[in-house]
Structure formats: structure tokens, C-alpha cells
Amino acid sequence: MDFLRPSTLDEAVQAKAEMPDLVPLAGGTDVMVELNFDRRRPSALLDLTRIAALADWSEDEGVLRIGAGVTYRRIIDELGKRLPGLAMAARTVGSPQIRNRGTVGGNLGSASPAGDAHPPLLAAGAEVEVASVRGVRWIKAQDFFAGPKRSALAPDELIVAFRIPPAPGPQQFAKVGTRNAMVIAVCSFAVAMDVSKRTVGTGIGSAGPTPLRAAAAESFASELPWESREPLPDPLVARFGELVAAAARPIDDVRGSAAYRRHALSVLGGRTLRWAWEEYRCGST
């Protein structure tokens, strides 16, 4: 197995163009597990940790651009107030050691339906920046996932960053698992409110072949009492949860049944909506 360590992004994309089957390596929290269990044996690894630009984030015209090498710990510490939903999800990822190494870019690269970062990215309308020798393009998060552990990446492309607006309102994330962290989610859900547009974004994890949005639940958010900020009636909360559950496409597996996942999502949907709404009611926005 070859091991390549480029120091610039240009070198990295050139290597990917010449060897499309090589596997990018950043935190290694997914790749090294697969190697250790002999589930994967690529011809080469592409170590991206020397490329400083991938470990940086910036803001331009009100949008955050976060490098693929920015760790979960840095998202929590440096961006937690601006991206609360993503920070909540990051806190549930693995152990402190994993959060110190793992990256959202790596989570996107694995394209697992159970990736904890994916629902907040969907809910917030994030975009993924990918690069190759042919140039740079942006892919909406909802279009990035093509199937279980399959993405819209071309063979010669690398994930460079993701672009996401600072939270324009309350955000929430919740997941069901055998424990709160260091566990693959049975299902997960994120909501992101835009209080100026009176909209709610959604993201469903671990309940379909890809992470999903609940489009009908998002449309139903127009029924919320935005102007009065009254407490949400129980029937309205329950209906939102039902629409979230209906959007899921779960299967039965060792972590849970399809029926349980749908039920859990209906609870998570209503619960996170109520949490976000109470934050909106008590806030000044």
C-alpha cells in the first residue's frame, strides 16, 4: 500500500487524478477502523493532514466556509454559538479523542446514512465544496448523498470544505442510540429555524439509504404561530412529528426495526421542534 503526503491542495488533487482509487485520510477515525478490520485494502492512502487550507475556516458575505479538515472539537469550541445544531451533533460523536481527530469532511466522505453531522447540514441548507484538476464545484448537501456510503463525488474529486450560513434562528439535534455518544444512531433528527423567513429546515439520519429531508414537515412549518409566538399546541407538534416519520425510509437491522425508527422519529421531530420553538419564544429575534 502506497502512502502519499501532499503539502498543497494542488498536489492532492493531482494525485487523485492520477490514482482515482486512492483513499483520502484526515482524522482516520473511519478509514483506520476499516483497515484494521481488513474491510478495505486500497492501493494507496492520501494523507491530507499537511494541507493547512483544509484545516481553516472563514466567513465571507455572511456564509461560513469550513475546511474539510476542521475537527469536531473545533466546531464545538470555535463555532458552537454560530452553528448550534452542528455543534450539538458533534458533541455526540465518539469519545473526546475521536472528536479531537474526526472531521465533518471525513463524515461526508464516508457518506454513511448514520453520519451524525449529516442531518444538521441538511437542515441548515449546507453545500459541499469539491475539487479536482478540472476545477471546483459546489454540491447541495441534499444532493450529495447517492446511496448507502455512496456520494456524488467523481472518482478524481476531493472534499475541500462545506459552506453553511450562521444559524438564523434556533437549531436542535437529537438522536436515539443505546447511549448518548460513542454509538451509531438508531435514528437522528435535526431542525433549523430561519425566523426571518418563517421556515424550518429538517434533516433525518439513520432512517433511509441516505440522510433525508422531511419536505412535508418543512412545508407544514408555515402553520406555526410565528407572529404571536404562542406555545405550540400538542396536536400541531404531533402532526409535525408524524410528517417527519412519514419522510423516513427505514429498514429492520440489528440496531432497530423500521417501525421503531418511525416511532422514534415522530417523537424526536416533535421534541426538537418544541425545544427550538421555546428558544424562539424566549429570544429577541
Image (cartoon, grey):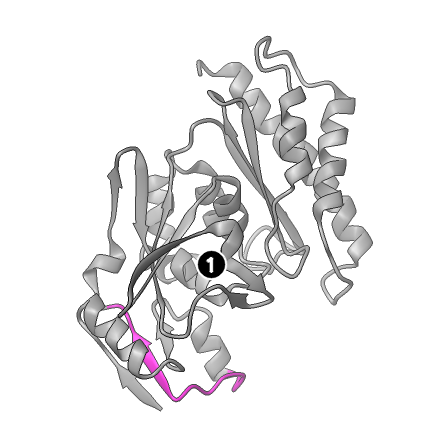
- Residue drawn at x 49%, y 23% is 197
- Residue drawn at x 49%, y 42% is 88
Stretch in magenta: 37-49
Closer-to-camera residue (266/146): 146
Residue furthest front in the image:
134
Q: Amino acid at mark 1?
A: Ser
Quadrant position of the C terminus in the picture = top left
Q: Position of residue 257 (x, y in %)?
A: 79, 59
Quadrant position of the N terminus in the picture = bottom left
- Residue drawn at x 67%, y 34% is 217
Give the quadrant of residue 255: bottom right
Judge from the rendering whether residue 215 lies leftward or rightward of residue 138; answer left or right. Answer: right
- 127 over 171 or under it: above or below: below
Closer-to-camera residue (188/60): 60
Q: How many marks?
A: 1
Q: Which residue is mark 1?
A: 95
- 262 over 82 or under it: above or below: below
Give the quadrant of residue 26: bottom left
Residue 275 belongs to magenta span: no
Q: Position of residue 65 (x, y in %)?
A: 30, 46
Residue furthest right in the image:
259
Q: Position of residue 284 (x, y in %)?
A: 44, 13
Residue furthest left in the image:
7
Looking at the magenta stretch, what is its main secondary structure? loop
Q: Label 1's element? A: loop
Closer-to-camera residue (190/8): 8
